[in-house]
Image: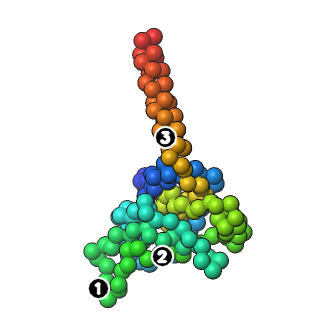
Amino acid sequence: MTKDYDKTITLNRKAKHDYIIEESFEAGLILLGWEVKSARNRTIQLQEGHVTIKSGEAYLVNAHFSVPSTTCTHIKADPKRRRKLLLHQRELNKLIGLVQQKGFTLIPCSLYWKNNRVKMNLALGRGKKLHDKRASIKDRDWKRAQDRELKKNQGNS
């Protein structure tokens, strides 16, 4: 019997608004038990999170995992601790080179379940300037208006 539920845990909706996304990668995360419970409850926020590379390894920093009430009392749960990302060495070397040389940044875009493991969609992107954000808002509004007109014309015929 298969479960029909959404495998997405959380999305970072501001990522596409604040960054021009060039390429995306899939990475695993090393989580503690209470963090997996938080993922099952979908009480994770990626908005302030970012990825840093330290001594050849990638870490998710400032992502907020809410502490469930059922967490053991003898464990000190830090909701914003840094979590190690699991990437292939080839991918990691590519990311290190691009981030250091070309001014790219690593953005966590989403968390989701894959084969009972928590995976993260990690994007390589550049920060948008204010005029880029205005242009993308203008394009989005223009597409919305086009769709509205199309729908109106479909209803008339």
Identify the residue at horizontal 52%, vertical 61% (top origin): 108
Q: Tell me the quarter of the picture where residue 58 sits.
A: bottom right
Up the image or down, 12 lies above or below 116; here it is above
Rendered-image quadrant of the C terminus: top left
Q: Is residue 129 visible?
A: yes
Secondary structure beneath dot 2 equals: loop
Q: Nearer the viewer, residue 66 or 3?
A: 66
- The residue to which callout 2 is attached is 82
Among the two numbered marks 1 and 3 on one chain, the one whose residue lies closer to the N terminus: 1
Among the two numbered marks 1 and 2 on one chain, the one whose residue lies closer to the N terminus: 1
Secondary structure beneath dot 1 equals: loop
- The residue to which callout 1 is attached is 73
Q: Which mark is residue 60?
A: none
Identify the residue at horizontal 40%, vertical 62% (top origin): 45
Local crowd size for mark 1, using a 10 Å CA cut-off: few (<14), some (14–19), many (≥20): few
Image side of residue 74 versus residue 84, left or right: left
User: Which mark lies nearer to you, 2 or 3?
Assistant: 3
Q: Which mark is residue 134?
A: 3
Up the image or down, 70 lies above or below 27; here it is below
Image side of residue 36 versus residue 122, left or right: left
